[in-house]
Image (tube, rainbow, N blue to C red):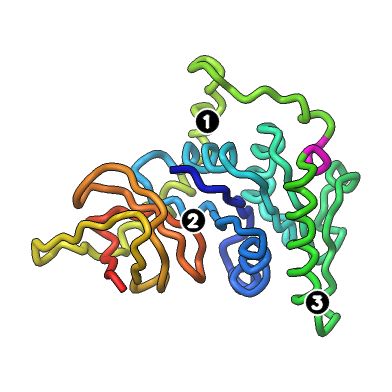
Amino acid sequence: MKHKFCFIIMPFSEPFETYFHKIIKPAVDDNELYSVRGDSLFRSTHIMDDIWNSINESSVVIAELTGKNANVFYELGLAHALGKPAILISSNLDDVPFDLRPLRVLIYDKNDPSWGAKLQENISNAIKETLDSPAEAIPHTFRNYKKPETGEEITLSRRLKSVESKLELLRINEFNNVESAFLNNESIEFKIGDLVTHAKFGEGQIVSFEGEGENARLHVNFNAHGLKWLMNKFAKLKLI
């Protein structure tokens, strides 16, 4: 089951975590899209394969450029290579590389008392405009990009593994911090549409899943954290 979503490219640290929950995600919700981030992809496949596929399947991408984070620019490069419409935001123009400055960038001024509300409105409007005219948010060089169709064409993700070890380690560590949900040998069968709660991510709704039983991978849209993939046997989800 396919759902339209927005892939969020951002540093996973404060204050950006707060910006995501208070500003970016509400703007995405306004447009009836799900929010997905690189740290949402708790799956058994390689993290860069997941990021590549998530960007490729997204309707629009939002990239927070503040701080010149290397992973942000790396994933934004993947989005551009895939011809994905991207909305760029930054707290100052100095953090926007020279070759990206010809593109539209939403600059926010944190000295303005109402900067958060203004940024949320600007992002929401930008998403609406981008969904109506996606080509306008794609650099001219990549507008005629043809999506890969054959196994030979889908090779880029396999060439990235030499720079992925740190990202993979972070994913594994976070995944292993989740306790097993089946220590008492009792399992719960979930179905699409079920409302659930998670100890870390709070309340959400199951929107899709892969596999069956305790080995199923559940796709849950959490109210405060957006879409996340969770292994059923580790997630410790409870029905609401």
Question: What segment carries the magenta color?
Answer: 135-139
Q: Is residue 86 left or right of residue 223?
A: right
Marks 1,3: beta carbons within 8 A: no
Give the CA distance from mark 1 to mark 2. 17 Å
Question: Residue drawn 11% across and 63% down?
Answer: 186
The residue beneath circle 3 is 115
For badge 1, the amino acid type reads Ser
User: Regarding mark 3 in the picture, which secondary structure is present there?
Assistant: helix
Tell me which corner region of the image, top left, top right, bottom left or bottom right, holds residue 81.
top right
Where residue 195 sits: x, y (%)?
36, 67
Give how far apart the Cα atoms at labels 3 and 2 are: 26 Å
Tell me if residue 97 can be seen: yes
Please say whether residue 191 is one of the residues in the magenta stretch. no
Is disc 3 surrounded by few (<14), some (14 to 19) or many (20+) residues within 10 Å? some
- Magenta-colored stretch includes residue 138: yes
In this rendering, does residue 173 appear at all? no
- In the picture shown, does residue 69 fall above or below 210? below
- The residue at the far front in this view is 193
| Residue drawn at x 44%, y 56% as measured from the top left | 228
Residue under label 2, please give it. Answer: 39
Q: Assign a secondary structure to mark 2.
A: strand
The answer to whether 67 appears left or right of 227 in the picture is: right
Of 175 and 165, the residue lying toward us: 175
Query: Which amino acid type corresponds to the residue marked 2 in the rendered image?
Result: Asp
Q: Quadrant of the N terminus?
A: top left
> What is the number of callouts on the image?
3
The residue at which mark 1 appears reads as 157
Of the 4 image quadrants, the one containing the C terminus is bottom left
Residue type, numbered disc 3: Trp
* Residue at image location 71% in from the left, 33% down from the top: 83
Task: Measuring from the top left, give residue 91's x and y in whole percent.
Answer: 80, 66
